């Protein structure tokens, strides 16, 4: 639901603004939930707020990657989606493994007991740190880095329109070649 709602704002405000505001919102929601989310009903409210921020990131992340690939095409004259997808996998796969390792390290450090039906207050704090504080910090760092993302504004929109025109022309030529 949140993704559908947020996607309606992209045309009005642009990818960068929605992506950036979603990251800041998600980070703030993670911090807030870490601070007040120790009871189930309050945690649900926090998770709902987190979902709004994550939805905005989800809606805008791939189109931003498309903008980066388009920009690269303007510099190199080549369309290199597979290169970007491959490099993305090289970064994200180890990052996922690192995240899993970090969660387990935090849980162990704070005394998480795998077989216990109830965790100690210390272990509960470790769970909160692993699932809320670490993502809050990482998302905040990501948001800060996006502030300097240059593919935004009227000049970029004009360049995107030109790229779209070039792609339509290439597709038209390709279809004509296929008919021969």
Image (spheres, grey):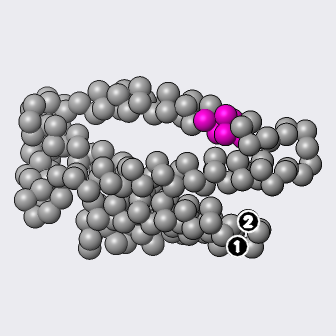
Helix, strand or loop at label 2? It is loop
Please state, as top left, top right, bottom left or bottom right, where the N terminus lies in the image.
bottom right
Which residue does the image show at 78% across and 48% down from the upper left? Answer: 123
Q: Looking at the rendered structure, which numbered label has been put on residue 38?
A: 2
Q: Is residue 111 left or right of residue 138?
A: right
Residue 100 visible, this angle: no
Rendered view: 88 above or below 135:
above
Q: Please give the label number shown on residue 42.
A: 1
Q: Is residue 124 visible?
A: yes
Within the image, what quadrant is residue 57 found in? bottom left
In the image, taking residue 145 as reference, residue 55 lies left or right, namely: right
Q: Position of residue 90 (x, y in %)?
A: 41, 26
Tag nearer the camera, 1 or 2: 2
- Residue 3: x percent and y percent? 48, 64
**Residue shown at the point (67%, 34%) measured from the top left:** 105
Residues rendered magenta in the picture = 102-107
**Does the CB distance between marks 1 and 2 fall below 8 Å?**
yes
Q: Quadrant of the C terminus?
A: top left
In which quadrant of the rendered view does residue 49 lie? Answer: bottom right
Point 41% across, 63% down: residue: 24
Q: Is residue 45 left or right of residue 171?
A: right
Residue 32 image point, x, y percent = 57, 67
Disc 1, SS: helix
Tell me which secondary structure the magenta stretch mostly adopts: helix
């Amino acid at each position: 639901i949140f993704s559908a709602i947020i996607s309606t704002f992209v045309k009005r405000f642009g990818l960068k603004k929605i992506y950036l505001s979603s990251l800041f919102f998600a980070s703030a929601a993670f911090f807030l939930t870490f601070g007040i989310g120790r009871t189930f009903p309050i945690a649900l409210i926090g998770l709902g707020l987190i979902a709004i921020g994550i939805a905005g990131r989800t809606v805008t992340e791939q189109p931003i990657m498309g903008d980066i690939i388009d920009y690269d095409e303007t510099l190199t004259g080549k369309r290199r989606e597979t290169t970007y997808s491959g490099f993305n996998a090289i970064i994200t796969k180890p990052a996922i493994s690192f995240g899993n390792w970090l969660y387990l390290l935090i849980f162990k450090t704070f005394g998480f007991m795998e077989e216990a039906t109830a965790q100690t207050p210390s272990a509960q704090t470790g769970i909160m740190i692993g699932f809320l504080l670490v993502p809050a910090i990482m998302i905040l760092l990501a948001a800060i880095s996006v502030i300097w993302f240059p593919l935004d504004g009227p000049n970029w929109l004009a360049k995107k329109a030109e790229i779209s025109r070039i792609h339509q022309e290439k597709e038209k030529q390709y279809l004509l070649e296929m008919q021969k």
